[in-house]
Each structure stands twice: as structure tokens, then as C-alpha cells.
């Protein structure tokens, strides 16, 4: 029999599907076999079919959790853009005050501040000793510079003219070299911090990518158009993982060794986000899923999934469905609603009423400044 277990989900004779799956150390420690009990002839004769571990790893190894917020602090000013981590503190640039702030990650208190080196500092990196700051002058037609500055007082140590780039934003340090997001050509460029030589260039995964950080092995960037965070290969820019941003319009990113930090100028917040592996995979069709004021059922679903939620106050509500590549499948709701109980449903079609393939999708709710994202599974 073919080892394409997802294809079995669409078979008309499937009455019961039982997924037996254990995770003891993340996705890569799945049990040796996963079993499905299937009613072959609709007469109660069940055949158990086992699929080997490698097949399951291939299908589930890309699943991460959906960006759970561990902690958040207020931004130091009203239009914070650049963000980096120095091992103990966050550094934030703000273009409304044209200042750079050293911030306590526990409570957001400003420890130190000084004038930014340019007119529009929208990316920051820490090389272990000094800060690096990109400046694009506030637009695509202004001179672009990269500044190395003393973190004690903001004194400029050196300046690199980024004449070969266009509208630089996020910047990060990989231990030896700098990487810079170029917004206009939609690229990420690796440069030598001493000679300013361009060493390598990769494409961004989306058209709205501006933030950048390094997690020790891979690059992370964000996209303000899709509100997604991407872990990407530094070799070719291919997407490894996708996580939903904790708020719309993410600007820059920082990595503290365990968690991502994401700055949102719209929310005036900096979020500490868990992007670790999921610890469980629940495929019990009879189970309902609930989170706070949201209930999603059935999950997985076959023909229709319902979203019940309650608003404690009048609110602007946005509900969108994304695929695993971070592309919006459809918008279920984007309007102001009164307080009280509400219900939405989705039939597994895209924005032009076409049926979409079986698989995992993300449902993202935004209630004013609160965001909830959950995995949903379509199994026809």
C-alpha cells in the first residue's frame, strides 16, 4: 500500500482515523510508527496501517508553535524601528525622537540614551563590543550609511557609505560579518565590516521584509505586509520556518539566545516571542479547541470549521487564514463589532472560493491590540 497517509484522509470510505503519536524531545523524537485505523468497507472491518517514522518527520518537522508572547514592554518613544540585543539589554532606535535607547528587557526602563548618528536609523546590530546602525535618510532617494558607534555615548567610530544598496533597514551580526536588508531591491546583503565589500546577496522571502537578526545558525527577517516572521537560510534565502508576528506591522528583530524580540511601532510594544518546537500534536477529531475568549471546532475539520468568540468591549476585529508559507489564503472578517458573542465559519476555500489542499493552516485573530494565532487542520 502507498505510504501517502495524507491521501487516505480524502478517501470516501474513511470513517475513523486514529493518530497515535508521541513526542518526547520535540518533533524529531516521534515514535517509531504512527497508526491509522481505517474502516475499509464501511462494515466495521478496521485495518490498521502503520507508517514509518521518517515519513512523519518529513510531514511535521516544519511545524513550530505560533509565536507565543512570553513578555512585552513598552517602546521608549512613539516610532521605534531598530532593535538589537547586547547580551543583557535591548537597544532601540526611534525615528520620532531621532534617539537611541538602551532598555531594560524586564520593565522597559531606559538605562541610557543618546542622539542617533543619522536622520533615520531603522536597523541596529551588536558585534559584541559596539553598535552598528543603518541610516537611510527616511526614504529610497536619500544617501544610505552604516555607522559603527560607541555604546556608551553614541560617538561615531567609523562610517560606511552604502552606495551600492537602496533603502537599508534591518542589520545583524553573524559573529564575523554584517547582513543588511535592502528594501528597494528586496535583498539581504552580507558585507565585510572592515572593507565594506559585498560578499553575498540573497532574496528576501517577501516584499515587505525590513527587520533582521541572527540566531547563531540562520537569519530571521519579518514582513510588515504579511505580519510574519521568517527563519531563512543564509546560503540562498530559502524559508526554513514561519511564525506569525505578535502584532501587525513588525519592524525589527533581536535574538537573545532563546527567544525572538519583535518591535511594533503601531502597538508601541516590544514583544519577547517563543518560536520553539511544538511539544504536542493533537489530531483527535472529536476534540474542540479553546483559547481565552475563542473556541475553534472541530479541529481538524472536513467541511466547515467554526470560530466562536466573545468580545468584552466594542472592537475592531480581523480574522485571516494563512498557509505555512505565510501567504494569506482568505480574510474571514475585517470590521468593527459590538461586545458580546460572535460566530464565524470557514469552508476551506480561498478568497476566490476555490477549495484549498489538505494540511495545516494558521488562523489569526486581532482584537484591537490583542492577537491570537492558532493552528487548524483541514482533512477532507
Image: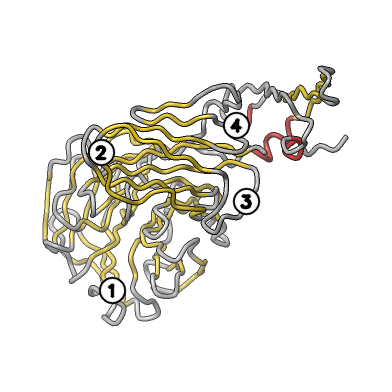
- How packed is label 3: few (under 14 Cα within 10 Å), some, or many (20 or more)? few
Is 103 placed above or below 83 here?
above
Q: Which residue is mark 4?
A: 27
Q: Which residue is mark 3?
A: 355
- How packed is label 1: few (under 14 Cα within 10 Å), some, or many (20 or more)? many
**CB under 8 Å between callouts 2 and 3?**
no
**CB under 8 Å between callouts 4 and 2?**
no
Give the SS element for disc 2. strand
Kindly report which numbered mark, 1 or 2, lies closer to the viewer in this rendering: 2
Q: Earlier in the sequence, mark 4 or mark 3?
A: 4
CA separation in Å, label 2 and label 3 = 38 Å
Q: Which mark is residue 72?
A: 2
Residue 343, image x, y percentages: 40, 36
Residue 371, image x, y percentages: 33, 41
Give the SS element for disc 3. loop
Residue 267, image x, y percentages: 23, 49
Give the SS element for disc 4. helix
| Residue that extends furthest to the top in the rendered view of this protein | 44
Side of 271 relative to 380 (left or right): left
Residue 41, image x, y percentages: 85, 25
**CB under 8 Å between callouts 1 and 2?**
no
**CB under 8 Å between callouts 1 and 4?**
no
Side of 73 relative to 24 (left or right): left
| Residue that extends furthest to the right in the rendered view of this protein | 1
Q: Which residue is mark 1?
A: 145
* Quadrant of res 26: top right
- How packed is label 2: few (under 14 Cα within 10 Å), some, or many (20 or more)? some
CA separation in Å, label 4 and label 2 = 28 Å
Amino acid at each position: 500500500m502507498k505510504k501517502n497517509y495524507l491521501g487516505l484522509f480524502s478517501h470516501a470510505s474513511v470513517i475513523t482515523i486514529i493518530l497515535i503519536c508521541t513526542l518526547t524531545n520535540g518533533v524529531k523524537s516521534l515514535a517509531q510508527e504512527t497508526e491509522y485505523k481505517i474502516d475499509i468497507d464501511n462494515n466495521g472491518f478496521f485495518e490498521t496501517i502503520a507508517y514509518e517514522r521518517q515519513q512523519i518527520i518529513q510531514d511535521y518537522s516544519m511545524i513550530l508553535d505560533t509565536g507565543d508572547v512570553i513578555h512585552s514592554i513598552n517602546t521608549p518613544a512613539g516610532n521605534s524601528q531598530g532593535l538589537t540585543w547586547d547580551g543583557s539589554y535591548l537597544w532601540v532606535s526611534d525615528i520620532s525622537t531621532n534617539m537611541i535607547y538602551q532598555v531594560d528587557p524586564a520593565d522597559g526602563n531606559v538605562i541610557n540614551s543618546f542622539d542617533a548618528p543619522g536622520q533615520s536609523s531603522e536597523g541596529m546590530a551588536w558585534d559584541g563590543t559596539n553598535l552598528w546602525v543603518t541610516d537611510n535618510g527616511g526614504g529610497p532617494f536619500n544617501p544610505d550609511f552604516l555607522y559603527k558607534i560607541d555604546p556608551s555615548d553614541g560617538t561615531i567610530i567609523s562610517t560606511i557609505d552604502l552606495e551600492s544598496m537602496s533603502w537599508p533597514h534591518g542589520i545583524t551580526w553573524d559573529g564575523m560579518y554584517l547582513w543588511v536588508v535592502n528594501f528597494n531591491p528586496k535583498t539581504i546583503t552580507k558585507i565585510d565590516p572592515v572593507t565594506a565589500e559585498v560578499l553575498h546577496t540573497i532574496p528576501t522571502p517577501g516584499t515587505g521584509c525590513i527587520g533582521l537578526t541572527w540566531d547563531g545558525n540562520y537569519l530571521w527577517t519579518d514582513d510588515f505586509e504579511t505580519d510574519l516572521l521568517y527563519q531563512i537560510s543564509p546560503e540562498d534565502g530559502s524559508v526554513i520556518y514561519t511564525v506569525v508576528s505578535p502584532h501587525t506591522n513588525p519592524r525589527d528583530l533581536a535574538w537573545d539566545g532563546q527567544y525572538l524580540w519583535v518591535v511594533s511601532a503601531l502597538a508601541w510594544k516590544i514583544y519577547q516571542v517563543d518560536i520553539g518546537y511544538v511539544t504536542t500534536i493533537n489530531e483527535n477529531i472529536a476534540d474542540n479547541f479553546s483559547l481565552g475568549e475563542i473556541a475553534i471546532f472541530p479541529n481538524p475539520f472536513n467541511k466547515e470549521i467554526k470560530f466562536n468568540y466573545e468580545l468584552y468591549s466594542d472592537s475592531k476585529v480581523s480574522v485571516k487564514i494563512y498557509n505555512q508559507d505565510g501567504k494569506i489564503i482568505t480574510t474571514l472578517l475585517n470590521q468593527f463589532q459590538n461586545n458580546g458573542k460572535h460566530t464565524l465559519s470557514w469552508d476551506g476555500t480561498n478568497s476566490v472560493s476555490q477549495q484549498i489542499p489538505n494540511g495545516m493552516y494558521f488562523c489569526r485573530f486581532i482584537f484591537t491590540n490583542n492577537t491570537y494565532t492558532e493552528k487548524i487542520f483541514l482533512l477532507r
